[in-house]
Image (cartoon, coloured by chain):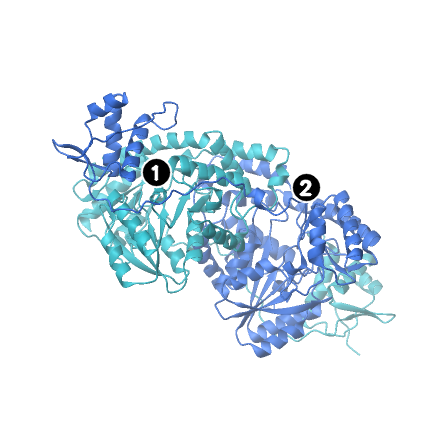
Chain colours: A cyan, B blue
Amino acid sequence: MLREWEFQIQLDEQSDKAIYLQIADAIIQDIHSGRLAPGNALPGSRNLAQRLKVNRNTIVEALNVLLIEGWLVSKERRGTFVASTFPDFKKDQPITVTYASIADSTSRPARLQIDDGHPNSKIAPINELARAYRQIFNQKARWRLMGYGNELGELEFRRTIVQMLNHQRGMRINEQHICITRGSQMAMYLTAQCLFSKGDYVIIENPGYKPAWDAFEQTGAKLLPASVDKDGLIIDDVLAYLKVHKNIKAIYVTPHRQYPTTVSLSLKRRLELIKLSNKYGFTIIEDDYDNEFHFGYRPILPLSSVVELNNYVYIGTMSKVVAPALRIGYLASSDATLIEKVGRLRKIIDVQGDSIMEQAVLQLVKDGTIKRHIKKATNHYKSKRDITAILLKKHLGNKASYLIPEGGLAFWIVPKEQVDWALIAEKLNINGFNMITPDNYSFDKTVNGMRLGYASLSEQELEECIHMLADLFTNI
Amino acid sequence: MLREWEFQIQLDEQSDKAIYLQIADAIIQDIHSGRLAPGNALPGSRNLAQRLKVNRNTIVEALNVLLIEGWLVSKERRGTFVASTFPDFKKDQPITVTYASIADSTSRPARLQIDDGHPNSKIAPINELARAYRQIFNQKARWRLMGYGNELGELEFRRTIVQMLNHQRGMRINEQHICITRGSQMAMYLTAQCLFSKGDYVIIENPGYKPAWDAFEQTGAKLLPASVDKDGLIIDDVLAYLKVHKNIKAIYVTPHRQYPTTVSLSLKRRLELIKLSNKYGFTIIEDDYDNEFHFGYRPILPLSSVVELNNYVYIGTMSKVVAPALRIGYLASSDATLIEKVGRLRKIIDVQGDSIMEQAVLQLVKDGTIKRHIKKATNHYKSKRDITAILLKKHLGNKASYLIPEGGLAFWIVPKEQVDWALIAEKLNINGFNMITPDNYSFDKTVNGMRLGYASLSEQELEECIHMLADLFTNI
């Protein structure tokens, strides 16, 4: 015979949890702790009800829950027992829960971020976007939109992007040549996963865009850094690699405005690169990350628009045009089979994109909002660029060199002397600015330059920051 | 001396493209086609202006574009020439663009989808969601939301999910133990990529959930199918594998309501599985895909809530509660280091989640909308389940067996005789219903059963479909 089980419980009538569930959980606790052992008989429901001063039905419900969940078994005419078939556990310590704030754990608070060319969120077409969402939510068959969608993106949205690429960027594709992604990073990831295997080589620009490299290396592919000068990627470097390595699958380039140095790839080198790609059979992965904001005559047409190029993946984004939080990018390729492969992988990764957002952005494209916004934003950014150029000349004119970019949202600033970037970053941080240190752009930690995104800072903040840089370039 | 270049161009004053760009592009065409060769001199701008009957400034602008883009070079006092440094291309045919509709290419049109348990989009809380979006777009510092976010999900959103998991599902985690994902599929993908390498083994339920298997196999891991009976996963199968294979890294289970058979894993087997996991050191990946809609006393608490379990990944989703198009899932683990790893990979895949949507859903959680919706939807689905049960009894009572599920949005129907599922699917298709054939749930193509999602079909559609099944089960 077993000794009497002393059931102790503090019932809380204010709790969200029903009384019968509180009782059930307390019994589970007692089974866990060993106070109730396998095979033990429970007191009758009338007895328990009296002890806990609750309605007998409440006890019956609690016991029912435990019977359904398998903690208890009911034996006809004999009563209710703790199930006898639990394996033993060594008693572990429960996990201690500490609600440490993650926000508190970052090293030092900084007021402002010197980013690498983010758009100005304050001029994002938010009212228009809100209107588009409202219209979608108000439309009659709106619930259709709430169902599952296509892994390559909604057909109409793809067609609209295709039309834009064909009309404005000289491409020749249809909707079977494109996959809509969550921003350009996912386009990079999908491309890498579908093109590369372990042991493959990918030529990259150095300095260049590390998040793309991370996506490539994730496949086990190896990176081959080619240098960049005032005409962009140096083709001789590419050629040298091609002569040594057999498994060069692709080259990743930012020809329109090289990241981070902002130089454009010269026409001569463009055509040489295309010729090499055709000859050696590697794919040109063209990241056209800031085609949208251009201050000169027109953006140079993508490499991927050149009829002669056989193998390309063209990556673009709408995030900068609308708002960074709206992650809409795309990848296009002449190779529809590659896009099918991308679609299959995309389904495995996250099923589909955000069809509500695609619908909202589609509306903004159709009603001309995007076009007007790009025009307005381009004017805004052009004058911001001009202001930045004046500030740079005033404070850094004889201490650093830089191009005045014909588009995009950043300057590349190269101090005339080699400086200690870690120290500069630290001093800026103390004064309330976070900067991205040059090793973030570099394959081999030798680059001497910083990217100054001018769009998201105010004029005053820009002047403060540039003035501070002038001091630091001199005194460090 | 070169023979005269005959410049032919049809200028279109109605076009979106400026006249000077039309001229520039026509010259590029002529360079491409070889009508203008490297080194050829261009006529002077006055001459060209006369020939094309345009203002001379228009020509000057066109030539400027070409000089900037590198197609032409200007030699002092001698004029403008085609750049001499282009590599030769074999002339390829341009890609022919055909706008074939992808929608047309699916095999046969079907009016209705018999899905595997989708929610009813028509009862999604769309008005409330629209209101939440409106409020977000109207708030003062709304542009902050438009910037870049955290790869694990917004802190406040994570805290809210953590609170829900701790309070309602007995878990003991904090915000460092969770990553918000694009639906549960991405949670599966991230888990697999961070836990498995080529050559590892993963035990799965058979029949089971193939999209998860696809995510696991993507890593090069191998699947070991364990059978399922009326008490869920058979532990003896698991034990047999553990005795043979060393590299068993994880087991993927749906204990709450097994997918696709809807049976619950018995408490005894739950505890045995936990014990095996602790003994052999493999991770339990628990997919709690339909915890939300439960018609009985309460959902059984997750395996992951059991204090004794050392290694788990718990995967859930909000997509079914709000709307499938809103892809919000999460993965939680006792292992904060794993979550860090997941965060790093997530950043490579798509940088971050959808912070605007997270904000909107957060609002719905905070103001009680989600709670009310779950209550309302549960009632709705319960009566739909009851109707379906009546229909099944009426038409299929003596031809098939099935459980009446205590929650979730689907029945698992097993015909008493083995039937030809391919033929049944074809006949249903002819009559306007698409079904998911049983091989989609099966590791080895032997399962005899179909999943009938009852939530997204109307009562009439359900009756039509079940009636048709009764005919097909008899006559095939």
Mark 1 closeness class: few <14, some 14–19, many ≥20 residues within 10 Å: many
Q: Is residue B28 above or below residue B450?
A: above
Query: Is B445 left or right of B174, judged from the image as shown?
Result: right
The front one of B374 and A43 is B374
Q: Position of residue B34 (x, y in %)?
A: 27, 39
Query: Is A101 left or right of B453, judged from the image as shown?
Result: left
The front one of A6 and B110 is B110
Tell which subunit mark 1 falls on.
Answer: A
Circle number at residue B300: none
The reply to whether callout 2 and callout 1 are in contact (CB within 8 Å) is no
State which mark lies toward you, 2 or 1: 2
Q: Position of residue A378 (x, y in %)?
A: 35, 32
Q: Position of residue B413 (x, y in %)?
A: 74, 58
Measuring 63% from the left and 39% from the top, which residue is drawn there? A143
Q: Which residue is mark 1?
A: A455
For the residues marked 2 and 1, what is the alpha-carbon distance in whole angstroms? 43 Å
Measuring 41% from the left and 62% from the top, which residue is drawn there? A197
Q: Position of residue B74 (x, y in %)?
A: 17, 34
Indicate the quadrant containing the N terminus of chain A: top left, top right, bottom left or bottom right: bottom right
Kind of residue at badge 1? Ala
The answer to whether residue B390 shows anywhere in this view is: yes
Q: Which residue is mark 2?
A: B123
Measuring 34% from the left and 30% from the top, which residue is drawn there? A379
The front one of B23 and A405 is B23
Mark 2 closeness class: few <14, some 14–19, many ≥20 residues within 10 Å: some
Give the structural element (helix, strand or loop) at label 2.
Answer: helix
Q: Is residue B310 above or below residue A54?
A: below
